[in-house]
Image: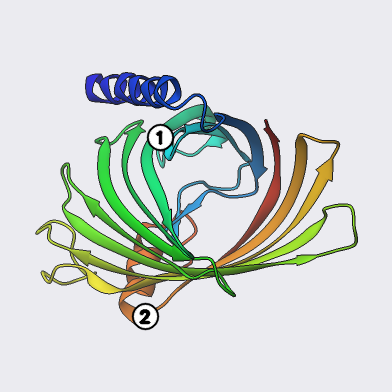
Amino acid sequence: MKRFYLAVLVGIMITSFSASHSAAEEKPTASASMGAFSKYIWRGYELSNDSVVIQPSLTVGYSGFTMNLWGNLDTDFDDRDPATPDKKEWNETDLTLEYARKFGPARVGVGYIYYALDGVDDSEELYLSTGLDVFLAPTLTIYREISHAPQWYVKLAIGHSFELGKGGMSLDLGASVSYNHSDDDDFTKENSTEKYRAFHDGNLSAGLKIPVGKYLVVNPVLAYSFPLSDTAKEHIEATSYSGDSDFLYGGVNVSLSF
């Protein structure tokens, strides 16, 4: 946790420095959101069990630098121990620091993520992301775990927004696929000593963007997560609460930006 707080402090210093350095060129941005969802799914993994999760987020940015704080509150956390009652639990806080620039239609970003987790070792990742401002907005992001479970996670995502009328409302559709390449001897395929290396998870999503006034947006969303290979299916089923590998989930996110 000391490293987490240090990363927060560094992020604040970087954002503050960039704000003071180019104040005449660009205005800082800030946004906050609160989401409530039927299930917590992360990279195909089921991280909640029959409970609503509340996920607040706070983002500040300036001159290409961005800092985000995100958290997860499980309203009925299942600790997999039948001897203890399920209860409300705040079990994750993530810090993301990023610097990004645009080069014509391309956007390139580099970042760092600290996952402060309850009950398991904290995690850290570096990532490189590149996207194109063209039809379907393809984005490729490469993540590298650098703390205790070295692995690569590569994600290719596309998406498109369809305007609905003149009030700023839109239908937002997205899809992604991923590949996971583990270098950790303890992260193996099910019933095998081979390192886990497989096409991992896919995700389809559909959401409505509903502006309310100038600064507020309501965003109901529905998503479907599924494995991309038999290896991934066996692995996800072995780690999930329900024993499933396909998950349909949804919720509502409310965001305020200025």
Q: Mark number for residue 94?
A: 1
Q: Amino acid at mark 2?
A: Ser
Q: Quadrant of the N terminus?
A: top left
Q: Quadrant of the C terminus?
A: top right
Q: Nearer the viewer, residue 160 or 133?
A: 133
Judge from the rendering whether residue 205 lies leftward or rightward of residue 226; answer left or right: right
Give percent across and percent down for residue 191. Answer: 20, 71
Q: Amino acid at mark 1?
A: Asp
Residue, disc 2: 229
Give percent across and percent down for residue 144. Answer: 23, 54
Q: Quadrant of residue 254?
A: top right
Q: Is residue 84 visible?
A: no
Judge from the rendering whether residue 232 lies leftward or rightward of residue 68; answer left or right: left
Q: Residue at x 32, y 44 (%)?
A: 111
The kind of secondary structure element at disc 1 is: strand
> Vertically, is 97 above or below 10?
below
Q: Is residue 107 visible?
A: yes
Judge from the rendering whether residue 164 lies leftward or rightward of residue 242; answer left or right: right
> Vertically, is 257 above or below 158?
above
Give percent across and percent down for residue 236. Answer: 38, 64
The local crowd at label 1, few if under 14, some if 14 to 19, many if 20 or more residues have their Cα within 10 Å, is some
Q: Nearer the viewer, residue 246 or 57?
A: 57
